[in-house]
Amino acid sequence: MSGVTVRAPAKVNLQLAVGAPRPDGYHDLINVFHAVSLCDDVHAAPADGVTVSVEGPRPGAPAPEVPLDGTNLAVRAAHALAEHVGLPAEVHLTIRKRIPVAGGMAGGSADAAAALLACDALWGTGLPRDELEELAAGLGADVPFALAGGTAVGVGRGDRLTPVLGRGQFHWVFAIAEGGLSTPAVYAECDRLRGAAAGEVTPEPDEALMTALRRGDAKALGRALSNDLQDAALALRPALAQTLAAGVEHGALGAVVSGSGPTCAFLVATPEAGLDLAVALSALGLCRDVKRASGPVPGARLVEDGAAAGRGGRTDRA
Ligand code: C5P
């Protein structure tokens, strides 16, 4: 197949400290991002105009509910790059989805970052890294991290990144809930729960978390995981409390709602412990699917076309 394929990772938030709402509709954050080995592939091929199709995790698997119109973040990324470099936007994007949709793991942002790199390669625009990062930030607060990968602290909207130099690999289990949660709705619920105090909160970095990352200490990292959006996600989806409790009961070192949810993330000591936990969570029937992954992994990157995203799936003009 002609064209190029870019793979981009999902993220879990190791710390998500949410500050006051801002006039631009965003919240000031301290957002410790961690990229994990659960990835979407975006294939870019020559076409007239911009079209997109989405496939499920396996060839022939049903495509998840991803918009196929101009609101699709990968489509927006293609248009943004074309406009930036003054070229006509001409690409067919095929997204192979593995990252849960509206799951709090920045799957749409991963697709946007992947589409940026894929179109840059397909069109030979060779955009400097800083310009790609600027375009990424314009597409969404989590998109720059999907380009960067690794582990990083994001401040401001979460898009001003500083890499965290940590040690070792961490092993994760993700409980994927049925259906998604709307990110703006979860932030709004967080403000509502905080009431009058919402305008006063200043997000603070967590030193214990940073020390755990520097030492590669999974036990300490498990204790330090935190998410200011968790109470809001639990208020909107009370059943998640049971999922989090079940993970801890079955050996997780730490349990946290990922981003705005509803995916629950469990840190485990070893891949074997991850398999045990995945089996236990599946047997309990508390979630739609269970995935295992490790991190940190690199950000969006070109891959050989052997593992390409493929053609087909739902297609529409965007
Ligand atoms: O950046 P992105 O468009 O992906 O963010 C989705 C929504 O999440 C925003 O429209 C906003 O409601 C919320 N958000 C926020 N503060 C942030 C990041 C996201 O309120 N720093």
Image (cartoon, grey):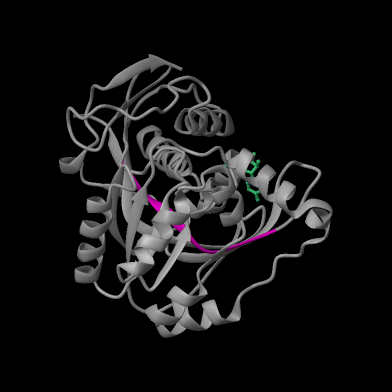
Which corner quadrant holds the N terminus?
top left
Q: Is 255 displayed left or right of 92 in the figure?
A: right
| Residue at 52% across, 34% down | 81
Residue 2 drawn above or below residue 240: above
| Residue at 38% across, 15% down | 316
Nearest the camera: 243 or 141? 243
Q: Is 196 displayed left or right of 110 in the figure?
A: right
Q: How many marks?
A: 0
Residue 149 drawn above or below residue 232: below
Quadrant of res 83? top right
| Residue at 56% across, 56% down | 230
Nearest the camera: 181 or 305? 181
Quarter, ligand 1 = top right
Q: Give the magenta part as a residue range.
A: 6-18
Predominant secondary structure in magenta?
A: strand
Quadrant of res 94? top left
Nearest the camera: 152 or 268? 268
Can residue 296 be seen in this snapshot? no
- The answer to if 12 sits in the magenta stretch is yes
Residue 10 drawn above or below residue 316: below
